[in-house]
Image (cartoon, rainbow, N blue to C red):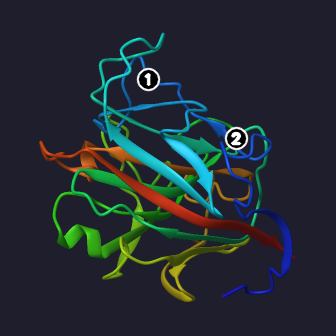
Amino acid sequence: MLAGFTRLVWADEFNVDGLPNATHWGYDTDRNQLGWYNNELQYYAAARAQNASVQSGMLSITARKESLSTAADYGGQAYTSARLVTRGKASWTYGFFEVRAKLSCSLGTWPAIWMLGTGGVWPDDGEIDLMEQRGGSAADKTVVLGTVHTRAYNYFNGTLGVGQGSSRTVNDACTNFHSYQLIWDGGKVAIGVDGVTYFTYTKPTPSDATTWPFDNPQYLILNLAMGGDLGGAVPANFVSDQMVVDYVRVYQR
């Protein structure tokens, strides 16, 4: 599935225990006080080992039922988690992206591996979702979603945008590791799992910035949200769960 992108240009193998590598990852906490988009319920902590840590070659992003009411930017959330970003540290235009991960099993959790444009204007700069997983039912936990969002293929009304995408059944997504993959070049965005492409968005003809914003840099995001439009209701007995990442690799030509 490399499609000619054979030069490894960036990677994190998570081989050093402790907090995530600060030269690779920052933390998005911008909406903690106001509340996160899509009706999400979590507080995203920064540099807090309880929510993001590396051990034994794995990154764990952990959502917990707890309230950090002493935090200066606390917004009343009953859950904590982490949203790791390469924003300001690394971004790419085109490439082959691979993230090997084991997803969270608990209902009410919404794990995601995705990318946003560095311009900071959504949806105009585009969004590429390598992997999202709903959390509303046990069946949701056996399916992963791949989606792109643009100005033309969206709506912007304060709730979840509707883009172009598809889904694939991965029955053991939350009990075993799988490779979530993206091929992105000047003519297409192709999303797959374990070497099998299940969704391709081809550059429209004709195209403009509203249908194809994907000739500009994007940065990578790893996060585990709670509740919200895709996460669904969080069970009363939820305590904690994780998305575990084995590695992140970026290849270019």
Residue 29 in picture, x, y percent from top left: 53, 28
Q: In which quarter of the image is residue 163?
A: bottom left
Left or right: 139 in relation to 42: left
Q: Which amino acid does label 1 sit on?
A: Asn
Left or right: 109 in relation to 92: left
Residue drawn at the location 74% of the way across and 51% of the way down:
217
* Viewer-proximal residue among 62 and 133: 62
User: Is residue 154 visible from the viewing direction of this image?
Assistant: yes
Considering the image in quadrants, where does the C terminus appear? bottom right
Name the residue beneath numbered marker 2: 87
Instruction: Tell me the element at label 1.
Output: loop
* Viewer-proximal residue among 46 and 167: 46
Considering the image in quadrants, where does the N terminus appear? bottom right
Name the residue beneath numbered marker 1: 32
Residue drawn at the location 18% of the way across and 45% of the way down:
234
Vertical side of 107 occupied by 193: above or below:
below
